[in-house]
Amino acid sequence: MNINFQPFYDYQVGGSLPINAPTYIKRTADHEFYDTLKQGE
């Protein structure tokens, strides 16, 4: 059995990653920012 898995990633230099990027790591600040936006602040 030969398993040769190579994931495909589009690397991005600079700017923001989309939230669905496979290399995106959710941060506490992401949730705090979103919650603040929902409150209209």
Image (cartoon, grey):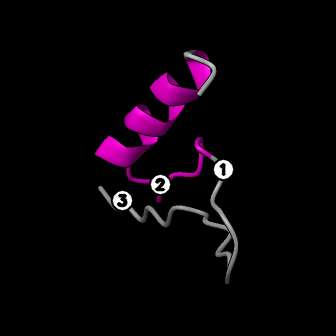
Of label 1 and label 3, which has the lower sequence position?
3
Q: Give the quadrant of the C terminus.
A: top right
Is residue 9 something that shows in the picture? yes
Q: Mark 2 points at which residue?
A: 24
Residue shown at 44%/42% (left/top)? Answer: 30
- Say which quarter of the image contains residue 12: bottom right
Residue neighbourhood size for the residue with mark 1, other residues' Cα within 10 Å, grouped as few (<14), some (14–19), many (≥20): few
Name the element at disc 3: loop
Name the element at disc 1: loop
Closer to the camera in the image, 9 or 31: 31
Residue neighbourhood size for the residue with mark 2, other residues' Cα within 10 Å, grouped as few (<14), some (14–19), many (≥20): few
Residue shown at 36%/59% (left/top)? Answer: 3
Of label 2 and label 3, which has the lower sequence position?
3
| Residue furthest out toward the bottom | 13
| Residue furthest out toward the front | 41
In this rendering, would 17 be left or right of 7? Answer: right
Residue shown at 66%/50% (left/top)? Answer: 18
Q: How far apart are marks 2 and 3 (CA)?
A: 26 Å
Closer to the camera in the image, 20 or 6: 20
Residue 18 badge: 1
Seen in the picture, residue 21 relative to 11 is either above or below; the reply is above
Seen in the picture, residue 11 relative to 16 is either above or below; the reply is below
Residue 34 position in % (x across, y down): 52, 30
Q: Give the quadrant of the N terminus.
A: bottom left
Are circles 1 and 3 on residues that touch, CB within 8 Å? no
Residue 3 badge: 3
Residue 25 position in % (x across, y down): 38, 52
Closer to the camera in the image, 36 or 24: 36
**Stretch in magenta:** 19-38
